[in-house]
Amino acid sequence: MQVKRITAAESSLVTDLFNNYRIFYKQDSDILLAQQFIQARLDNNESIIFVALNEKEEPLGFTQLFPIYSSVRAVKNWLLNDLYVDANYRKQGVGEQLIQTVLQFAREDGAKYVDLSTAIDNYTAQSLYEQIGFEKQDADREFYNYRIKVD
């Protein structure tokens, strides 16, 4: 498995995964919307996307990061907003490898932390995040919020 950061020209690598991610969170399937959203984020340098590929260079999963800024610390941190692994490749280390890539990227970028949220009923993801070292911060009615320091 290879994890790589994609460019705007490679957005099609994650379009189907992003559409399936939205379906997982109870949104209607809309491949055109998925394609346009991903393309716009990359075209406008608004997000960083990593994709996990198998030996045939087929996408297995992806993660999308958005910058968040700390005025007090005067640094850019990262929100791991989206993480999705195709159902056929779950429990094979794909999600963990994507997260480890994100953490390394955040460290090299000078971030102090990475935040994420996950559905309260997504026990598999919660277990993975906590195993990696993310600490639960708080919750609302639908999501738990997590943070990990990377500096």
Image: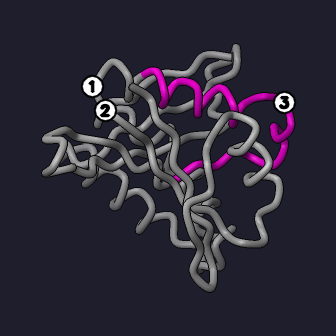
Percent coordinates x, y for residue 60 in the rendering: 68, 35
Q: Are marks 1 and 3 in contact (CB under 8 Å)?
A: no
Q: Tell me the element at label 1.
A: loop
Q: Is 7 left or right of 120, judged from the image as shown?
A: left
The part of the chain drawn in magenta is 82-104
Where residue 148 is drawn, which disc sits there?
A: none
Question: Disc 1 vs disc 2: Cβ atoms closer than 8 Å?
Answer: yes
Query: Which residue sits at x=64%, y=72%?
Result: 25
Looking at the picture, tell me which residue is in the foreground, 107 or 51. Answer: 107
Which amino acid type is marked by label 1? Gly
SS class of the residue under badge 3? loop
In percent of the image, x 72 and y 72: which residue is there? 120
Within 10 Å of the Cα at label 1, are there few (<14), some (14-19), or many (20+) other Cα atoms?
Answer: few
Crowding around mark 2 (Cα neighbors within 10 Å: few <14, some 14 to 19, many 20+) is many
Task: Identify the secondary structure beneath mark 2.
Answer: loop
Would you name the residue on which mark 1 appears?
A: 110
Residue at 67% x, 69% y: name it. Answer: 119
Residue bearing mark 2:
111
> How far apart, in angstroms, are the residues tagged by discs 1 and 3?
30 Å
- Asked if disc 2 and disc 3 are in contact, CB closer than 8 Å, the reply is no
Instruction: Estimate the x, y position of residue 16 in percent, counting from the top left.
Output: 58, 52
Residue located beneath label 3 in the image: 92
- The C terminus, quarter of image: top left
Name which of mark 1 and mark 3 comes first in the sequence: 3
How far separated are the C-alphas under marks 1 and 2? 4 Å
Instruction: Residue at the far front: name it.
Output: 72
Left or right side of 101 for 53: right
Residue 117 location, quadrant: bottom right
Using a 10 Å C-alpha cutoff, classify the residue at mark 3 as few (fewer than 14 neighbours), some (14 to 19) or many (20 or more). few
